[in-house]
Image: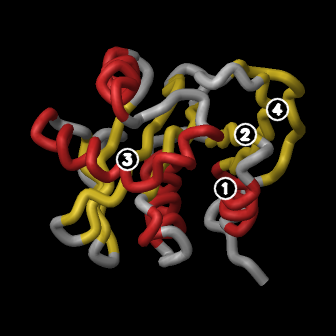
Amino acid sequence: MTLDAPMAAEGIALMRFVEADREALRAACARDRDIWSIYPYSMVDEHFDPSLDARLEKQDWIVFTIRRGADVVGVTCYIGVDPKNRSLEIGGTYYVPSQRGSGLNAVVKRLMLERAFGNGFRRVQFSIDTRNGRSMRAVEKIGAVHEGTLRKHRVTWTGHARDTAIYSILADEWPFTAG
């Protein structure tokens, strides 16, 4: 099965983004205007279309709309898909506030990791702004290893020079069982 094929479990579906999802995703992203200050880009107001379009134009990105039932509840991506080195990143993830802490993230990440490793990828990376403690804890829960922090690594859309925590999971470490 290809990386961009639909994925589903437990009432949650990841589908490759299609234009018909644009307005529902715009509305979902606007549900938490404040969170975008810790992202490298904004997906609200006049920033939404250029940010989404930039993602869609990248040849090594796959953008997924996340649905719970019929509702669009977020977005996530495979980033920097590198078949030669069998590595990619999972990121650009946003969930509407009502879905945070609901178990959605664990299902989404499990589906994406299973798909990546099932397609022969051996390394999945997560790059997280160190101000986003919730995301760092979430990837640690699924077994990601903190490899280090890149200091003043990236300038965000707000002008903040962010520190980026790098995590990864290797194919031979998956599936991770807490305990």
The answer for how far apart the CA atoms under marks 2 and 4 are is 6 Å
Image coordinates of residue 138 in percent, x first then y, are: 67, 63
First along the sequence among labels 1 and 2: 2
Marks 2/4 in contact by CB < 8 Å: the verdict is yes
Give the residue displayed 66% in from the left and 42% down from the top: 126
Q: Tag 1, which secondary structure?
A: helix
Disc 1 residue type?
Ser
Neighbours of disc 2 within 10 Å: few (<14), some (14-19), many (20+): many
Residue position for label 1: 135
- Crowd band around label 1 with a 10 angstrom C-alpha radius: few (<14), some (14–19), many (20+): some
Write the residue at 50% across / 63% down.
110
Q: Amino acid at mark 4?
A: Asp
Task: Name which of mark 2 and mark 3 comes first in the sequence.
Answer: 3
In the image, residue 175 lies at what x, y percent?
62, 66
Residue 24 image point, x, y percent: 20, 49
Measure the C-alpha gap from mark 3 to mark 1. 17 Å
- Residue occupied by mark 4: 163
Residue type pointed to by label 2: Asp
Q: Where does label 2 land, which residue?
A: 129
Q: What is the distance, in whole Å, between disc 1 and disc 4 at their CAs?
A: 14 Å
* Residue of label 3: 29
User: Which of the marked residues, 3 or 1, is nearer the chain's N terminus?
Assistant: 3
- Label 4 element class: strand
CB contact under 8 Å: marks 1 and 2: yes
Nearer the observer, 139 or 39: 39
Q: Along the polypeptide, which appears first: circle 1 or circle 4?
A: 1
Left or right, 174 with reference to 4: right
**146 up-or-down from 48: above or below:** below
Mark 3: secondary structure: helix
Badge 4 density bin: few <14, some 14–19, many ≥20, Cα 10 Å: some
Q: Residue at x 51, y 58 (%)?
A: 109
Q: Residues within 10 Å of mark 3 (few under 14, many from 20)?
A: many
